[in-house]
Amino acid sequence: MSITTAFKNAFERKIEKNWDKIFVLVDIHDTILKACYEQAECYEYFPMAKEALQELSSRQDICLILWSSCYPEKLDSYLDRFGNDGIAFDYVNRNPEVVNTSLACFDDKLYFNVGIDDKFGFDAESDWAEVTEVLKSYQ
């Protein structure tokens, strides 16, 4: 499934179910930033990643969740950097807004509508431009 289709499906379901927002999960390495596994961190964004994330984080109809396996001290430096770049994540590795129901348990698996991660098939070199385009369609 393309990232455009994933967003369209999520927004259409939001409209159909009369939800206030959708939940978007985003990884850091090889998704937002080009992976740099050296001691000195690299903050080189993929094309259109910063702009798309600024738009995602500014919208009231999107809850933006950072999805990362970084250690807490490293995660704090990323969050500071993203904040300085106008990107605000609502949560990190959790979604307390969606609780267990009679049909679903979210104790160990957080709920999200769209996942943006290279391991989910997201192509960071080209897909961020698609994200910005689909967001324009659902304002």
Image: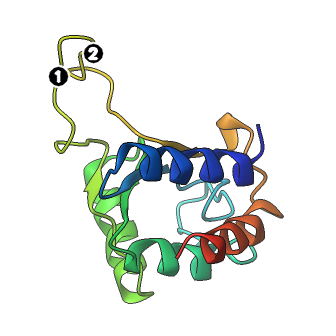
Q: Determine the CA span between mark 1 and mark 2.
A: 6 Å
Residue lying furthest top: 103
State the residue position of label 2. Answer: 104
Give x and y (percent) for residue 13: 49, 43
Residue placed most toward the observer, 49 or 130: 130
Residue at (76, 66) in percent of width and height: 130
Quick check: 27 left or right of 8? left
Residue lying furthest right: 126
Q: Quadrant of residue 76?
A: bottom left
Tell me which amino acid carries mark 2: Ala
Residue 32 position (above or below residue 133): above
State the residue position of label 1. Answer: 100
Residue at (57, 69) in percent of width and height: 138
- The local crowd at label 1, few if under 14, some if 14 to 19, many if 20 or more residues have their Cα within 10 Å, is few
Quick check: 23 left or right of 125? left
Tell me which amino acid carries mark 1: Asn
- The answer to whether residue 77 shows anywhere in this view is yes
Question: In the image, which disc is placed on residue 124?
Answer: none
